[in-house]
Every structure is written in C-alpha cells, then in structure tokens.
Amino acid sequence: PARLARESGVSLRHLQAVFSEAGTSVAGEIRRDRARIARSTLQDTRFDELSVEEVAKQSGFGSSVSMRRALEEIYNLNPRELRNRRS
C-alpha cells in the first residue's frame, strides 16, 4: 500500500480513505489482483512447468501458503483444482 501511494503521488492515508469509501482496502485489492494473476498462470498451459511455489513468487505472494489461502478464499479452489479447470 505505501509503495502504491508513493507511485500514485498521494499519501497513504488518502489512498486508504479512497479505497475505504469504495468498501475495500488497498491491501485487499492487491491480494485479489495477485490471486487473479495466480489463477491466470495456473490455468494457462504455457506455465505447466512452473511449480506452485514459482507461481506464487511470480504472482507477488510471499509464499505458496499465502497464495493457496487467497485462492481458496477468493475462488474456493486450490492451485491443483485451478489447473484442472482450464477454459
């Protein structure tokens, strides 16, 4: 959140207030965005050779555990289930 505020040229407090007015948080949106990236990567056959740990790292998560928690919370699916649900 602090980096996003700095890169956006606004204070962290202002950025948090804007997100709060929208009913969300900066950290929550960052986590959702990382989960979207992870889901896309897991469902793309071009990235089948990547381990779950590598997908987590490339998606911006600190660990595969935090990625798994986010995916299960947001999509109700774990990484293996996402790989099996390809479009």
Image (cartoon, helix red, strand yellow):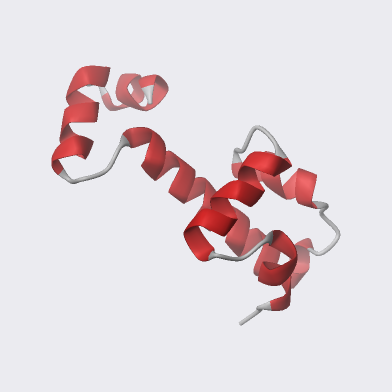
x then y, percent, for residue 80: 75, 66
| Count of marks placed on residues | 0
x then y, percent, for residue 85: 66, 78
The correct choice, above or below, for 35 with respect to 18 in the image is below
Q: Residue furthest left?
A: 21
86 or 77: nearer the viewer: 77
x then y, percent, for residue 18: 17, 35
Is residue 78 in view? yes
In this rendering, would 49 be left or right of 61? right
Q: Residue at x 39, y 41 (%)?
A: 28
x then y, percent, for residue 19: 22, 38
The correct choice, above or below, for 83 with respect to 1 in the image is below
In this rendering, would 38 be left or right of 50? left
Is residue 37 in view? no
Quarter of the rendering containing residue 58:
top right
Q: Residue furthest bottom?
A: 87
Q: Residue at x 17, y 23 (%)?
A: 14
In this rendering, would 24 be left or right of 75? left
Classify the position of the C terminus by image quarter: bottom right
Quarter of the rendering containing residue 47:
bottom right
Classify the position of the N terminus by image quarter: top left
The correct choice, above or below, for 85 with respect to 24 in the image is below
6 or 57: nearer the viewer: 57
Q: Residue at x 43, y 40 (%)?
A: 30
Q: Residue at x 31, y 23 (%)?
A: 5
In this rendering, would 34 be left or right of 56? left
